[in-house]
Amino acid sequence: MMTFCLPGFRSFVKVWKSNLHLGPCAGHSRVSLLTGYNVIWNQQRWLSLTAVSSQDTKATNLPIAKGKYLRKRYEDSHMQVSSDSHLFAAGAAKKRSQMNPQHKDPASPPRRNTIQLPTKPLNSEEWDKLKENFKGKVNFEHWVSSQLAHFHSSVDVAKSLLAWVAAKNNGIVGYDLLARYLYLCVFHKQTAEVIDVYEIMKARYKRLESGGYSLLIRGLIHSDRWREALLLLEDIKQVIIPSKKNYHDCIQGALFHQDVNTAWKLYQELLSHNLIPMLETLKAFFDFGKDIKDDQYSNKLLDILFYLRNNQLYPGESFAHSIKTWFESVPEEQWKGQFTVIQKSGQCLGCGKTMESIHLSPEEYEFLKEKIMRDVIDGGDQYKKTTPEELQRFQNFVKYHPPFDIIIDGLNVAKMFPKVRESQVLLNVVSQLAKQNLRLLVLGRKHMLVQHSRWRKNEMEQVQKQASCFFADNISEDDPFLLYATLHSGNHCKFITKDLMRDHKACLPDAKTQRLFFKWQQGHQLSIINRFPGSKLTFQKSLL
């Protein structure tokens, strides 16, 4: 029997899969919003809300390369990483890449044979002596400023460095040093210093790169000159689309200064660029909305909740509490939020309602099947590399085979363990599944059949004995075949790959179809989560 292992949760699992229900429940008005929270113990907790009331209700242009440092430094210090580990969890892909053991700890101290960074401001003589002791081959001033920024050193230390450099260069400080000093001022929330650097940059440069603009925006939003951050946003828009972080900072500044209309305008502008807002941005709207008696504002917050649900965005713990607090603060509604437990059946123990199933109805399945066939497989040429002739060959192949139980993305599965021979990995997977009397289809490419150190011919022959196989041209992409075979085999058929198929979802024409595709994907995609090659197969189902 196949082992299905539910995702491991280290802290909170955030799953949004409920409909927004407004209506009576056991004598109370109720809204079921979040599916929620699995803390240190292995028990899921969910948030539901109940109304206990009876009522319903801007000299020289700068090289773009210089901006990469600023952008990376800026974004690294505000990075959000989800603690979830399941396949579709928020930030899961980023977290998997960050778990690479080859990555070095960014907070590691300076290597030996280098000078010790000062911890207090130095005078000119002290900086001269420190430079004499510096044995590095790089520019001393740039190295020190980079290290000061890296370790978030004192602004006063960095300022003493700039004063020393200016004294030696007729009062001139280069852009790189200014930018790193600006970074520290923003990090330590030294607004007056940010404004000083802003004035220097305005006087000296006609245009900045995006990293400099981003730092200035973030440094200005809590000052009485916050509207100048909006002008900087306009400067960015003359060159590129601003980042969601740029919009987040400007929205926060608008809300901080009580300019709600500007905040919502910026939010709509963000969405119009097809940017996915930061969860912190959405949280800011809920935090601002506490105790506001404004139906229009409330409706916009409800629209945010639907946006989260329809785009598979998962609130973290802090955001969930903000949502709960907002509902409880709505005047005259008397909502009461609580954390509850959802049974395996999907029933909430708090209100008795059953969560929306990930399983599609027969009508939904046929609708989605037709849409995928037309918009992804037949009409999605920009997303695939194959020929109409090869696709027809595959369709005939599937037509004359009985329905399959599991479709395997052979190349994807074979590369699970980079240090192990691909054909060996694939054979192990197929062999274990074949023992369960499952009808299997392995999708691969023709190069997999050529004898190679990574692909042994005898092992691939064993694969073909235990499963039906289709090997496409080497330039072809597997995903269209994977989707076609799975849908053609029926609603019972599952597929195995770690590819989340975002491109194919983007090819679908509307939000409804995209949501149905995601639900179908949740219920049919499996991912092998074995930690060691050759061990018994353990599958991570797409969703609980």
Image (cartoon, rainbow, N blue to C red):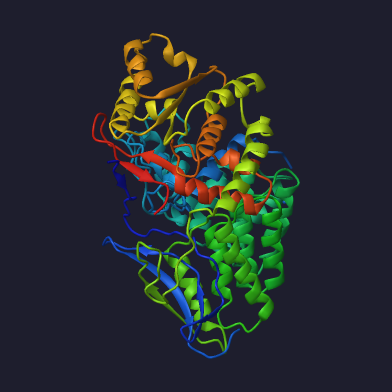
Q: Nearer the viewer, residue 429 or 136?
A: 429
298 displayed left or right of 135: right
Q: Is residue 124 visible?
A: no
- What's the residue at 60%, 46% (across, down)? 366
- What's the residue at 48%, 32% (across, down)? 139
Give the image location of residue 509, x and y in percent: 69, 46
Q: Residue furthest right?
A: 238
59 displayed left or right of 180: right
Q: Nearer the viewer, residue 117 or 296?
A: 296
| Picture quarter with the C terminus | bottom left
Q: Nearer the viewer, residue 472 or 368?
A: 368
188 displayed left or right of 175: left
User: How many numbered marks does the figure carry?
Assistant: 0
Quarter of the view holding residue 455: top left
Q: Residue furthest top?
A: 451
Decide: is 440 above or below 516. Answer: above
Decide: is 379 above or below 520. Answer: above
Give the image location of residue 489, x and y in percent: 50, 37
| Picture quarter with the N terminus | top left
Q: Is residue 535 visible?
A: yes
Give the image location of residue 214, x and y in percent: 61, 51
Quarter of the view holding residue 132: top left
